[in-house]
Image (cartoon, rainbow, N blue to C red):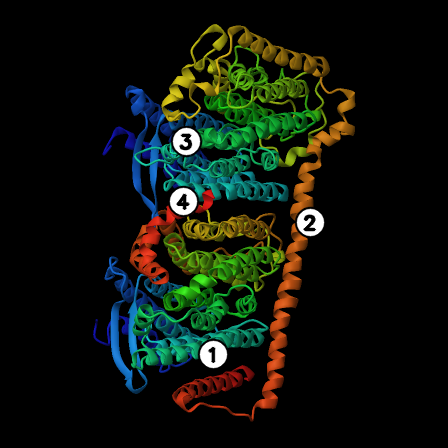
Amino acid sequence: METTPGLLTFIIFLPLAGALVLLLVPRESKETIRWFTLAVTVLVFVLSLRLYFGFNTASAGMQFREFALWMPQFGIHYHLGIDGISLWLVLLTTFLSVLAVAFSWVVEQRVKEYMFFMLLLETGMLGVFCALDLVLFYVFWEAMLVPMYFLIGMWGGERRIYAAIKFFLFTFFGSILMLVAIVALYYLHRDMTGVATFDLLKIQQALATSPLDLNLQLWLFAAFALAFAIKVPMFPFHTWLPDAHVEAPTAGSVILAGVLLKMGTYGFLRFCLPLFPDASQVAAPLMLTLAVIGIIYGAIVAAVQPDVKKLVAYSSVSHLGFVMLGLFALNAQGLTGSILQQVNHGISTGALFLLVGMIYERRHTRLIAEFGGLKRVMPVYAAFFLLVMLSSVGLPSTNGFVGEFLTLLGGFAADIPLTVIAASGVILAAVYLLWMFQRVFYGEPSEKNASLPDLNLREIAILVPIVVLIFWIGLYPSTFTDAMRASVENLIRQVNGDAGAAWLAQMGETVRTVTMR
Amino acid sequence: MVNSVFDLIWLVIALPLAGFLFHAFFGKRAGKKVVGTVGTAVVLGAFALSVYLLMELLKLPAEEQRVLSTLWRWIEAGSFRVSFEALVDPLSLLMALIVTGVGGLIHLYSTGYMAEDEDYPRFFTYMNLFIVFMLTLVLSNNLLMMFVGWEGVGLCSYLLIGFWYRDKVNTDSANKAFIVNRIGDWGFTLAVILAFWTFGTLSFAGEENMFQRAIDLKAANMLSPSIITAIALLLFVGATGKSAQFPLYMWLPDAMAGPTPVSALIHAATMVTAGVVMVTRCHVFFELAPAAMLVVAIIGVFTAIFAATVALAQVDIKRVLAYSTVSQLGYMFLGCGVGAFASGMFHVTTHAFFKALLFLGSGSVILAMHHEQDMRRMGGLAKYLPVTYWTMLAGWLAISGIPPLAGFFSKDEILASTFGTHALPVSVGQILWAVGLLTALLTAFYMTRLMGLTFWGEPRWATAHAHHGKDDAHGHHGEPQESPPSMTVPLMILAALSVVGGFIGGFAPLHIPNRFEAFLEPSAGLKVLGEGAVGHLPVSVEWMLVWASVAAAVLGIWFGWARYRAGLPESERELVGVRKVLYNQYYYDWLMVKGVGLWLGGKIANWMWQFVDVRLIDGFVNGIAGFTGWVGNNLRRVQTGYVRNYAFTILIGAIVLLIWLLVRGASAGLAR
């Protein structure tokens, strides 16, 4: 275990420190503020790369752990660490933060406050993925709501207040139940062991040695799951998402889709599955059903959206359905696919929001009907859009395919009929994305579109790393999946008990006999 | 296998990939001449390399003609692992030769056909990319890497159909192609998944391969018939999409919206045969699933005759050829369905020659007619376009099945195998044969009609094309001009292949052994049905079948000649009656696309959004919010609290306070 402050502490709190420094910069020097913020996020990203290079892929345990006493009388401590699951979400966060800030050059109003909140948000998100103490987790979880609330409410579109409050209330409602469940876990653990602690690893160990009875597990699972399902969002808790996305500024949407939604899926992976394994198995059919409804429903509703951004928002509901399908398949293929698909969604949907933002800055509208013929006017933009769209459609050789395929592969072993339905989601994805692409890019440009400038260097610089990642993950995903393997296997053991490992090996055999009946 | 000469197989893919990257990044600056030269050269280079590899492969003993070359591991998760791995065997090299050989000729042709197009570099970018994906498809050693090529060629098809994207008809057709193919890919994906969970691997060859597993399981009596049938049928769903079989054929006729070289390369010679290649590659699954075989044969023969009848009434020259392609692909699946996989592949090969020829010839006609495609406004072109005419004549006789041209041998083999198949009940085989024979007659008839309307009789184009000057690629009006050598040379090469290409096979009635089948033998590898799949017929029966085939072809041509030798009959000027029904594909396309797809799909989607999402779910949420506000107002004075939760009440209080302060600050900020 590292001593505090270690690498994780630096990564998490560097943005906060940057935000505080920003307060000293005069609000008139916008360029200084922008460059400084970009520098901070780039530095955080570079530091976070050290996590990857220093990561021991053979170990399933928490790495880069840090521990410090915080409120010992309540059993609350400063405890950080990452495993092969959170590693990628941390990297995704630091990566997307750089892009989001780089895009935010277009923000002209209240630049200082804007950048301040962006940095605050990054600290909150990184804390969520690294916290190993339930209270610490909860503090970060709630803390990150505040800057997001302001980003939507102050720099958003016309209905920003409605969207911001809706976003806040939906998430807060779930969080309250989660807080109750956290407190309950604290008391359960104290009664069980006599030790008062909010430490996740200790509670996890205690529950592993003497599992809770199923009924209790189900209640606690439900409390956590509701909070996370709203965040993901799973059908039918998704209606805050389209509103929040449409009203949020572009960088807000990128972070919202890219990282905030992953906090929900991460919650399932970190808390629901290992803490309540029996409840997870019992609830799996329900969660799989909701996941598949989300895939189909999100895709169908996306198809008829007149607003590009809303279309992308609903496509998120569909994509996150794949993530949940893989997650509750509770096998190696599904879980690996699910984690990879979380990263993929952050990259591809984040990129789609950036692309929508780029055209919005030029036309100040996002209505599909307003566009047409952009391929002729903005060929570079069209090419990038095509590549990102293909990744979102899940074309093999792009990242989207690897993730979707693995979730379907895993899902099939868990539930054949649902997976057969889920697989048709890739048909619908082609329908809504290709149709939108046709209306925006093909045809003759109208007068309003005829003289739009193509992408500038800053915009190209933002998109190039995304395209590189799309094909990197698509063609050589081992870079990413190798580091997940140990953690995923560990998670499966936790969910399935001691028999898990054997069960894992028998997987193919099981399915064969099941399907042969 | 380390550093074996066959690792060069990756260079075959890398060459067109380099061409693609070159055009994509430097195409505009390099200029048309460089782009056209590089684009064609990389494909022909890949062809030369494939020839070399084939010669090396044939030096090996037959049982070693399955060489693997691994690039890198691709996806790994739990017990699942799959690599980018090439399988070099006769089947994959045959397809590589067709793709790069015919592909190279079509690239050469394109340098002439697209010469005046402002998006010339973009065209070659997509074309080279297509070759990359098509080679990936045919050279792959596992189902998943094959799927990379499978969807990749679909992407290129989409991009090239919509190449002239300013016209909505073109991009509509492009979307239709991609989406209908995705329906097929749904089946493919599920087949891959089911195959993995059943066999634990997705490889075609090597230590662990799914075909050997399937046969072992079968031998141990552990292979569920329903599972293997499901795998075969799901794969076939994929094949009906990519190879335009009923009920998913309807994207292919619309795909003719793309430039004609695209129609020749992608929508006739190579991509659309991918389904046949895949079924042949996975023939073990099909042979283990007799029910699936029957479905393949019936769908194949039904598509063959269905599309042939629709072709009778088409007026657009390319659409005739499109339906003809659908119909010929049906023949290939008929061959697979009766267990004659080698005959199916033989027809893939000969069809690549004569259908590419016919499409390129039609392209030459279309250019000469200033982009007029309606045959009712053609006629009498034989003397203006002599090279096009004479080469197309070879294609016409080849597809009609006149001996000894290429199409005769391959089609006759399929029909004879159908008649004598042991894979299906004998009577079923004979019924399928009769339908196939009738289709052959129709084929000869509509192809004669195409030749008659285009080349024979009096010109009907004197005034017809005057207003087409806008997209006139070749400058001047007046008499139709023969195309430049860059276009006629490929026509002549393909015409020669259409004439003599059939001799690579054999001829049973004369006891000429089938060299083509023997060549593919190492690829077939594991045989389930063995020699018995396609029974040996008595020589007298073989001759009877040959004469029946020839008679069908001659009869079809004779009817066609009688009706169309003087050009367009008066009665065909308008589309009425039966011809209108045929022209509209029995209204099947209209029903599926306009009815089910757009109308019903649109209704459902709007209902889900406006009713379920906005009214139901959001209405519920907003109702709760309103109710909570009301309750909160009434109960705010009531306080509850547990002593032991004291600490957390403080925590919550602190958070709420913080939020409240910030919200107030923000509201003040917003009000400003």
User: Mark 2 sits on what residue?
Assistant: B599
User: Mark 4 sits on what residue?
Assistant: B25
Q: Position of residue B411 (x, y in %)?
A: 54, 18
Quadrant location of residue A136? bottom left
Amino acid at the residue labelled 4: Phe
Amino acid at the residue labelled 2: Trp
Indicate which disc, 3 or 2, sits on the residue closer to the N terminus.
3
Amino acid at the residue labelled 1: Ile
Q: Which mark is residue A176?
A: 1
Pick whichever, B102 or B338, lies toward us: B338
Q: Characterize the local packing of mark 1: few (<14), some (14-19) or many (20 or more) Cα atoms within 10 angstroms.
A: some
The lab-note entry on whether marks 2 and 1 share a chain reads: no
User: Mark 3 sits on what residue?
Assistant: B37
Q: Which mark is residue A2?
A: none
Pick whichever, A45 or B76, lies toward us: B76
| Mark 1 → mark 4, Cα distance in angstroms | 54 Å
Are the residues at dot 3 and dot 4 in contact (C-beta closer than 8 Å)?
Answer: no
* Residue B239 seen anywhere in this rendered image of the structure: yes
Q: Nearer the viewer, mark 1 or mark 4?
A: 1
**Helix, strand or loop under label 3:** helix
* Residue lying furthest bottom: B637
**Helix, strand or loop under label 1:** helix
